[in-house]
Image (cartoon, rainbow, N blue to C red):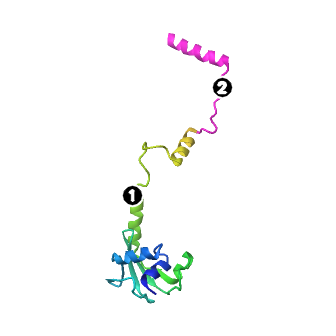
Amino acid sequence: MRIDKFLWSVRFYKTRSIAADEIKKNRVSIGASPVKSSKEVKVGDIIKIRKNQIDYKIEVLQIPKSRIGAKLVTLHVIDRTDKEQYEILKMRQSSQNYYRNRGEGRPTKKDRREIEGFLDVEGDEEELMDEESWDQFFTEIKEDEDN
């Protein structure tokens, strides 16, 4: 099977054309040498792939006939990637700021929910003041001002 089709069929890339583009950019190699899209993959090959700024290594166990389900990928390849590479990926993901800066633009749904949770808007319906309470409120304010 061609390497571009293999990488697509084991779900390493979303489309076959993306796999072919990555191969053209020399981000995929077997052994130490970069490959072309037409390179045939054999059982036992170790494929090195540069994706998301980390280097993956996968070993071919079986060649699938066509694209396979995500649960079956482990039957066809073994992940030989160094643990350090996954740690680098986790660090990059945690250091990236996916959220906009506070105060920029309208509040998002998430912001609105946090605000409502903080203010407890749902259970905080105020009762309307009757005339007596209203008058008492203003008389207390006048007394405070006089003192």
Q: Which numbered marker is on residue 128? A: 2
Identity of the residue drawn at 59% across and 13% down:
139
Q: Secondary structure at mark 1?
A: helix
Identity of the residue drawn at 41% across and 47% down:
101
**Amino acid, disc 2:** Leu
The part of the image, by quadrant, that contains residue 134 is top right
Q: Is residue 124 visible?
A: yes
The part of the image, by quadrant, that contains residue 70 is bottom right
Q: Local crowd at mark 1 within 10 Å, few (<14), some, or many (≥20)?
A: few
Part of the protein shown in magenta: 120-147
Q: Secondary structure at mark 2?
A: loop
The answer to whether residue 18 is left or right of residue 75 is: left
The answer to whether residue 19 is left or right of residue 145 is: left
Q: Nearer the viewer, residue 22 or 31?
A: 22
Residue located beneath label 1 in the image = 95
Q: Is residue 68 above or below residue 101?
A: below
> Residue 41: x, y in percent?
43, 87
Q: Is residue 97 above or below residue 37?
A: above
Q: CA distance from mark 1 to mark 2?
A: 49 Å
The answer to whether residue 8 is left or right of residue 69 is: left
